[in-house]
Image (cartoon, helix red, strand yellow):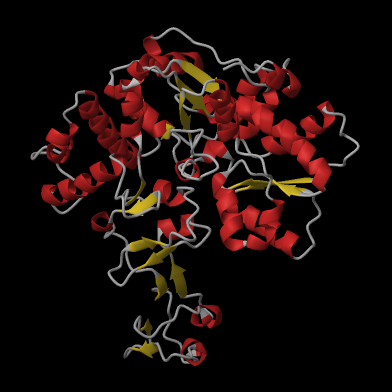
Amino acid sequence: MRKFDTKVQFLKYKVLREVANQAWKDTLYENVLDIPRMIVPGKVSTMRCCVYKERAILAERVKMAMGGYKDNPNIIQVIDIACDECPAAGYEVTASCRGCLAHRCEDACKKGAISFDHNHVAHIDKTKCVECGMCAKVCPYSAITNYKRPCQNACKVKAIKITEDNAASIEGEKCTACGACVYQCPFGAITDKSFILKVIDLIKHKYEGYKLYAVVAPAISSQFTYAKLGQVVTGIKELGFDSVVEAALGADMVAKAESKELAEKGFLTSSCCPAFVSFVKSEHPELEEYVSHNLSPMATVSKFIKENRPKSRIVFIGPCTAKKAEVQLDSVSPYVDAVLTFEELQALLDSRDIDLTELEEGTLDGASYFGRIFARCGGLADAVAEGLKEQGLDSFELKAVSCDGIEECKQALFKKKKNVLDANFIEGMACVGGCIGGAGCLTHDLKGRAQVEKYGKQAAEKTITDAVADAEY
């Protein structure tokens, strides 16, 4: 059965699964140096120059699966030794150069970086080029192109730079931890820290008397497509969780509170997507006052649980790598103990030989339709509209703009900054498609939106008010 989009994801999964497998047996630190050899035996061909380099890279992947480097606070990190297959980025002269006599490119370059060979074909001196792009603009044959690496194309906040050693480097102050570069790197040279060991530790220490909750994101309805959602719920309990709660219930709580806050303030941006909130704070600090004061659905429902069960422990399971950064915030860390992505959940299930297809179906029935559709772009705005209606605040005219990906978020925020935005609510989703496009997804199938909608309609009879009033822990 196919569980992942790419072979890079599968390789990452194999490392996570083996790390988890060794951790369950309490042999991880004893065998940690042997894990690369377990995954890539000596007779297996690799994509690298030799098996030894492949194992060296795998050793770094193991390190990231065990929590990464403590001196680097970034959730997203580059495995330098693996980042050596992409050609140098920047402006390049292609074979379309006709060796013309005009030499407009030379005239446009203020740094003297353009030279010509005996056939009048242009060449760019990288030591002088400042990547201004003027040569490309004036070339009549469009023979000069700006080559960007897949990670740079994926990063819409421009947090990735190329070092003198031709490796990618992430600027922590700009990075929103969205993970787009992780998913798009063809060699898996960029990856996210995993806290899978912390989750295993929480499961192992349940004898201390706490109840262990799994809070699952509504995007789970678009994942694990080889099994039924109810079987995934049962599988999570088989791992050792006492209860599985919908983060969508937290979304209902947020929709109710956020719609009221919007009506009171007149303008608001959402606070549900941690990557979006991080972008606002780093690039548009003057607009930070407009970010909703509500915690995210994950944090909101987790706070509700811990206020009612102070001894509980909570693990969030979802599609989002940025959640790993969110749980380190002082405002969130008291409520959420660890985060797993769907990729990591699959590795954890398989490390315990749990076959979802053989399990009975459990149930998820805490949230409304509107809470569940938070998983797709536009769902949050729909829920706010419903929240206004249910609370008798529909005299407030909602004019929402739902931003599908960080580029649309940038446009909406820029318009607000210039006071030309024709909207009073910005729904900010850093990933294209919303949470169903998160970097930690098993698959980014185009059917994801339809699957979330189907999942939401199973709770069509329940209102937001009903879901919040009936909330259990």
> Looking at this rendering, what residue extends furthest in the top direction?
360
Where residue 17 sits: x, y (%)?
27, 30
Give how far across and how far down residue 108 sits, in percent.
Answer: 52, 89
Q: Write the residue at 36% across / 39% down.
A: 6
Tally the numbered discs.
0
In percent of the image, x 41 and y 85: which residue is there? 99
**Which quadrant would the C terminus be assigned to in this image?**
top right
* Residue furthest left in the image: 42
Which quadrant is home to the N terminus? top left
Q: Is residue 409 left or right of residue 155?
A: right
Q: Which of the 4 image quadrants contains residue 452?
A: top right
Q: Residue at x 83, y 41 (%)?
A: 263
Percent coordinates x, y for residue 143 in the rendering: 46, 75
Observer able to see residue 3? no
In the displayed structure, would residue 244 be above or below residue 341?
A: above
Of 73 and 160, the residue lying toward us: 73
Residue 126 visible in the shown view: yes
Image vertical order of residue 111 relative to residue 373, above or below: below
Of the pair 318 and 231, the residue shown nearer to us: 318
Q: Nearer the viewer, residue 374 or 28?
A: 28
Q: Position of residue 274 (x, y in %)?
A: 55, 45
Question: Picture quarter containing residue 340?
Answer: top left
Q: Is residue 264 above or below residue 316?
A: below
Give the camera-side residue of 205 and 230.
Answer: 205
In percent of the image, x 72 and y 63: which residue is there?
A: 417
Residue 447: which quarter of the image?
top right
